[in-house]
Amino acid sequence: MAVIIDTVYQRVLAIANKEQRGYITPQEFNLYANLAQQEIFEQYFYDLNQQARIPGNEYIHSDIDDILEEKIQVFEKMQTSGFPTAIDPNYGMAKNGLVYRVTRLQYNGADVEILKTKDFFNCLGGGPLTRPSNKRPVANIKNNYIKIIGSDLNVNLKPTLMTYITKPNKVSWGYFIVGGSALYDSASTKTQHFEHHESEEVELVYKILKLAGISMKSADLASSAQNMENTLDQKEKQ
């Protein structure tokens, strides 16, 4: 379930105006909202890397790894067709602009092992037991290109399945003007809600408030929002 953008905006306004700290315009809010959601999105991968070093627990609903995976899966897509018709012989298949991180590749039903650059080239120059084949293809992702090699080391293969993570779509609080005031328009094509997991609603509010405080040169608002965000992070990581 997505996070409704108007809910976040109204909460941000309520907290910012509580002590007459100033009004946040829709244009400003949309700018802060997109920065905040991108920051939350990027943090998923750092948190997942850190949590991988810590033993989990047997309860899926409270295991941090599973919670993070659930949040990331909101942005996970699958593609089985529509791959580029032409593949660069030197670099491989150009990565679609929507693709942020590739999580899985398949070639004719065989899982493709995604290797780091050094391991990829070592594999190509290895012996019969380590050299890739069409039943055990390998891949390397570099400079926005996906290079997949099978039995013929001189041919770049095209995947038959790819799962990947895409960046969040740009959000926007759509509105119309009545009597000089901006009123929320839920039916507007300009209204785009947050794709994030609904549990991120509170953190979105805090991050947007922090950015607004910095922009308005309101040190107390920025500091208050930062403190609320820190408290939330501590609770989530306990």
Image: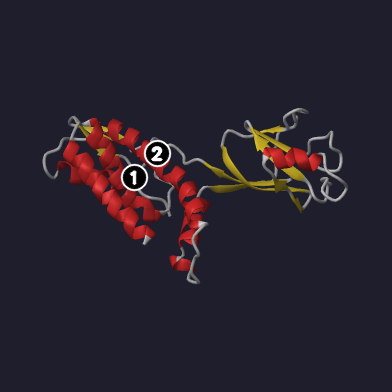
Tell me the amino acid under the disc marked 1: Ile
Picture residue at 49% right of the left edge, 65% below the top = 56
Q: Residue at x 24, y 48 (%)?
A: 227
* Residue 3 is at least partly visible in this image: yes
Residue at (34% x, 51% y) in the render: 201
Query: Do the numbered discs 1 and 2 sit on residues whose CB atoms are within 8 Å?
Result: yes
Tell me the SS state at disc 2: loop
Where does the image place residue 22, in percent across and percent down from the top left?
Answer: 16, 35
Label 2 sits on what residue type?
A: Val
* Closer-to-camera residue (80/19): 19
In this view, 22 is above or below 55: above
What is the count of numbered marks?
Answer: 2
Q: Which residue corresponds to mark 1?
A: 5
Please name whichever residue, 172 or 218, is drawn nearer the observer in this view of the structure: 218
Q: Position of residue 112 (x, y in %)?
A: 73, 48
Relative horizontal placement of residue 220, taking residue 32 as reference (left or right): left
What is the CA distance from the residue labelled 1 to the residue labelled 2? 8 Å
Q: Which of the two residues, 59 or 83, is positioned nearer the viewer here?
A: 59
Badge 1 or badge 2: first in the primary sequence: 1
Q: Secondary structure at mark 1?
A: helix
Question: Which residue position holds label 2?
Answer: 171
Q: Which residue appears farthest toward the left when viewing the image?
A: 19
Q: Position of residue 151 (x, y in %)?
A: 86, 43
Which quadrant is the C terminus positioned in?
A: bottom left
Residue 38 rendering spot, x and y as whole percentages: 42, 40
